[in-house]
Image (tube, helix red, strand yellow):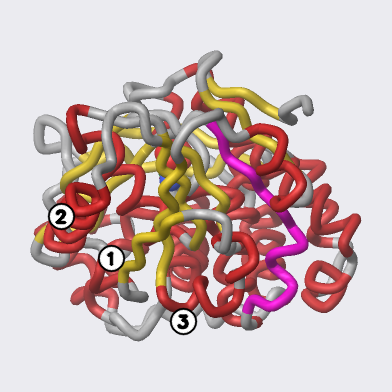
Amino acid sequence: MKPAFNVGGRSDIYIGPAEELLGGVLPAGRIVALSDTTVARCCGELLAPYECVLIGTGERNKTLRTVETVYRRFIELGVDRRTFVLAVGGGIVTDVAGFAAATYMRGVAFGFVPTTLLGQVDAAVGGKNGVNVDGYKNMAGTFTQPQLVICDPALLRTLPDREFRAGLAEVVKAAVIADADLFACIAQSTFGQLRSDAELLADVVAAAVRVKTDIVGRDERERGERRKLNLGHTLAHAIEKCSPAMNHGEAVAVGTALITDAAVRLGVLSDADRVRIRELLARLGFDLTPPVAMPLLLKEVVRDKKREDGLLHVVLPVGIGDCTVRPMTPEAFAALFD
Ligand code: GLY
């Protein structure tokens, strides 16, 4: 079986039926699966062949405490350096599993079967595995590539609409930063078509994964171009902190809309493209109203710890399928929204 994509010669990305692919691509030897209680109920058949470690659901479990409970279960099960860890689940499962596997006994091999759209097009691909610390997103983590990732669009059929929509925010992000054809394709489709047309969905997943693997292949450790994948995320992280009821994708949609407005004010994006981006997000069902007043969000941005030499790397769309990264102080960033 040939992977659709590869990152750095180490991470094979397959797009297709998970059960069948697992049979053909998993390494020989002991496999221990890691998943969460919800996925264990809905994807039981995928997990059935393996010993399984389960974590709780929700962002509040994306912590070092959860990683520690995983290490303890690994010790109880006698997981060693030759064991392969297979994570089956959404972004929280794959982040926790990737972090735990990359650090347990100084690293065991691992692979992912992402079961959410957000996981398939973003979280599970590219080797960033992080957990939150004191509510700050992904403050502890590793850059370690999964040996394999299997993106099976059929697994997304039972996803609630809200979860599916959250993944579409990352698809729109990929389209805005690097793929005008993907943008046009989503713009010509309805939410219902994206949900129900298996072929269309497989094409959309593949296109978004291509954007990500191309960029990560050129800049695995986020020293430059990979920063583009954070379009909308500076504000999204502040939104998630101020409004915990919103999920990551919903926050990314609002963050993308707001930074798109700022790009027009900075004179790097046309108003026509700003309207196209906002209209697409709104048509997919996102509410683009900031959930709290802008000054509160900007205060959170200024407090955020994710900086290099005191600077934020702000991703600005300069067209549909193109963007630029500008270093800015948090204060200069806040001034964009005065
Ligand atoms: N989620 C952004 C990245 O993987 O770089």
Q: Is mark 3 within 8 Å of ligand 1?
A: no
Inter-mark Cα distance, 2 to 1: 49 Å
- What residue is shown with label 1? 338
257 w.r.t. 226: above or below: below
Tell which circle, 2 or 1, labels the residue nearer the N-terminal end: 2
Inter-mark Cα distance, 3 to 1: 16 Å
Residue shown at the point (54%, 44%) measured from the top left: 317
37 w.r.t. 73: above or below: below
Q: Where does the N terminus fall, quadrant-wise?
A: top right
Tell which circle, 3 or 1, labels the residue nearer the N-terminal end: 3
In the image, taking residue 82 as reference, residue 228 lies left or right, namely: right
Magenta stretch bounds: 148-159
Instruction: Please tell me in which quadrant of the rendered image residue 301 appears.
Output: bottom left
Let me know if residue 268 is in the magenta part. Answer: no
- What residue is shown with label 2? 72
Q: Between residues 256 and 115, which one lies in front from this camera angle?
A: 115
Tell which circle, 2 or 3, labels the residue nearer the N-terminal end: 2
- What residue is shown with label 3? 289
Q: Amino acid at mark 2?
A: Arg
